Amino acid sequence: MALAVLFSVINVIMAIGDNKSLDAHFTVLVIASLVVTLLFAYFSPKVRKTLNALTFAFFVGFLVIVVLRARDVLVGS
Amino acid sequence: MLNGMLDRYSVKDPYVGLGLGLTISGACLAPIFYFIVESVPFTAIAISSIMLGLVCVALANTRPAISPEASQMMLEAGMENIAALLEELGLSGKAIYLPSSLRDGRSQALVPIRQDYSSIKFEDRIPGRLIVRHGKDPQDVGIAVATPGSICLDGLEVKPGPTSTEIESALSTILVGMLDIAGSVSVIANENKVKVEVAKPKLGYENVWFFRSLGSPLASIAATAVCEAFNKPVVVARDEYQKGKAVIELEVLS
């Protein structure tokens, strides 16, 4: 529920801010999901493990964006 | 493949149904919004839908395999059996929660014949039987029973240490995370006294033989966690329910 509300707020704010970068959207969403899942730390160990795996997958997506951006900067320079 | 997934996770579980719905619709809409509509905000909404769906599927694991009604039925049956046993044997003394090191691998509650628990000393490991002798005196007899707390502690990855923070963390994991029977937990440990405050408890206190002897289920879980944390026997000294919170005071015996 908290994640759904937060994602909606982020999307609305970024749309109002006229942000054209999908990378920026994804990065902010990943950070929000990391914060929310870490705040609700009292899950059972089984759920914790699954959520950690999911968080890792999101983080890998974030790293891909960082690598692509770094490549663009290096190629550009 | 989708049918297999649906069967495996049982769509009757609303979290799995919602999660799969959000993930699939997000995955279908994201390329349409990005390549055809060429709208970044809409694509971001589709991506957030995928992320939300995956989290929902992960959260489906929090739902119990059996219904709360079935769990309550089994809990009440177990409690009534123990209460009948205590009443039949006339054991009205306060239960002493023993750490797993004093029993055979699992912490249990000992209900002694003696009313005054302060005079009871545990020197050796107590045999893993129902009726146990804990001393040399003929009066040193009692019954040892498993409590809700004994089973709950198995769900913890690490045994809590004897500090307030560690006990609070363990109790929060059990009461708030695993069982969802409380809003929050705070613990103050001071020498041999431990005060546990449970906010928004979903289980109440009843003035019945079982609760007077073993304490309420919340007190039982708190006592088990504290006895394991200190590795010493523990007694529920106070078990009160006030407006919106339960106040449990535990005494750690030497």
Image (cartoon, coloured by chain):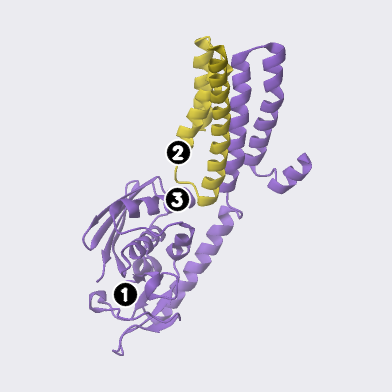
Chain colours: A yellow, B purple
* The C terminus of chain B sits in image quarter: bottom left
The tag on residue A38 is 2
Using the numbered discs, state the Cα–Cα distance from disc 1 to disc 2 in whole angstroms.
43 Å
Q: Which mark is residue B150?
A: none
Task: Say left or right for B99 vs A18.
Answer: left
Residue B178 place in picture, x, y as percent:
48, 51
Label 3 packing within 10 angstroms: few (<14), some (14-19), many (20+): some
Q: Residue B239 is drawn in which quadrant?
A: bottom left
Q: Mark 3 and 1 residues: CB-CB less than 8 Å, in contact?
A: no
Amino acid carrying mark 3 in the image: Ile
Which chain's residue wears label 2?
A: A
| x and y percentages locating residue B162 in the rendered image | 30, 59
Q: Nearer the viewer, residue B212 or B44?
A: B44
Q: Position of residue B94 (x, y in %)?
A: 32, 71
* Residue located beneath label 3 in the image: B181
> Could you tell which of marks 3 and 1 lies nearer the N-terminus?
1
Residue located at (62% from left, 40% from top): B57
The answer to whether residue B122 is left or right of residue B221 is: left
The Cα atoms of the two marked residues, 3 and 1, are separated by 27 Å
For label 2, count other residues whose C-alpha is less than 10 Å away and answer few (under 14), some (14-19) or many (20+): some
Q: Can residue B225 be seen by looking at this rendering?
A: yes
- Evaluate if marks 3 and 2 touch, with contact meaning CB atoms under 8 Å apart: no
* Residue A21 sits in quarter: top right
Identity, as a three-letter code, of the amino acid under mark 2: Leu
Using the image, determine if residue A74 lies above or below residue B75. Answer: above
Element marked by disc 3: loop
The residue where tag 1 is placed is: B93
